[in-house]
Image: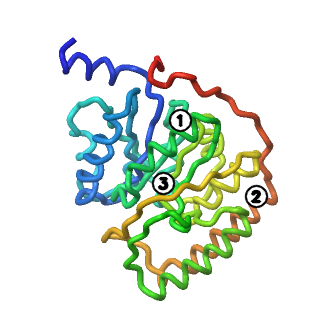
Amino acid sequence: MSPSSARDARASRRPLLEIVVPAHNEERRLPGGLLQLCAKLARMPFPTAVIVVDNNSTDGTAEIVRTWPEGQVPVRLVSCPEPGKGAAVRAGLIETRAPFVGFCDADMATDLAAVDVALSLLLSGERVVIGSRAHTSSSVENRHSRVREIGAVGFRALARALVRGVSDTQCGFKFFDGPLAREVAAELRTPGFAFDVELLARCTGRGSRVREIPVDWRDMPGSRFSPARHSFGILLELGRIWLRLRAFPPASVSPAWEPPLDPVGYP
């Protein structure tokens, strides 16, 4: 079989893993991020796919995805007109079909070597695996201002009240059992920065443990978060999450999918 035939055959098979990349006005960072991600996934011994969610961009983000060259890793575009990273991740997760799914940021701030660890844990039966910059074995290159660091400490304290036992809810690197992620995403109502808290709280409310893993993480230029502009809105989001979870607590469910013994032979 020729290399092109092998590539086409792999791309046509149902993916075992799909990764969602939310993107708002990311025409400068997205090409490099997609190159890294597709190169990583192409080295895996089973079919994979990428979903880029264009979150109401006004630049060339969507066109980059539409014209992305075909390869071993299919890349498709999903549009999300509702603003907010939470809305984009929700839209992407709902569009997945794979047994395992995840999401990461367009800047690939988290070293993609962690994908291997996350998938290995999911195959062993874990249902939620997330990167944690607070893990003792993590390597973190942080250029944040002192004000932002103080704000992050306060946010983590509030988040722990909603998601107990999780040290870092906000690292943009999270992987899940696919059926669980799609079920929880359908209930997600937080469109902004604090959506991770609601997502994880709904997972733990269903009896799924959150497994934190160490990551190599670099603070990439281009972040749109501003403590001055966004802190009050984040507090409101956390308050709404608390009220929503009290009013509509998630029901516990059992795993909907059994991991294959041989992911390499996955059809």
Numbered disc 1: secondary structure: strand
Relative placement, left or right, of 29 versus 195 is: left
How crowded pointer 1 is (Cα within 10 Å; few <14, some 14-19, many 20+) is rated as many
- What residue does disc 2 label? 245
Tell me the quadrant of the picture where the N terminus can be found. Answer: top left
Residue drawn at point x = 46 percent, y = 34 percent = 17
Q: How many angstroms separate mark 1 from mark 2 (CA)?
A: 25 Å
Going by the numbered disc 3, the residue's amino acid type is Phe
Which of marks 3 and 1 precedes in the sequence? 1
| Residue 20 seen from this side | yes
On residue 176, the disc is none
Q: Distance between the residues labelled 3 and 2?
A: 23 Å
**Which residue in the protein does label 3 denote?**
173
Percent coordinates x, y for residue 101 in the rendering: 51, 39
From the viewer's perspective, is residue 159 above or below residue 244? below
Q: Most extreme residue toward the top, as rendered?
A: 1
Image quarter of residue 157: bottom right
Q: Which amino acid does label 1 sit on?
A: Phe
Tell me whether the residue at label 3 lies in contact with that at label 2, contact meaning CB atoms closer than 8 angstroms. Answer: no
Image quarter for residue 51? top left
Q: Residue 100's mark? A: 1
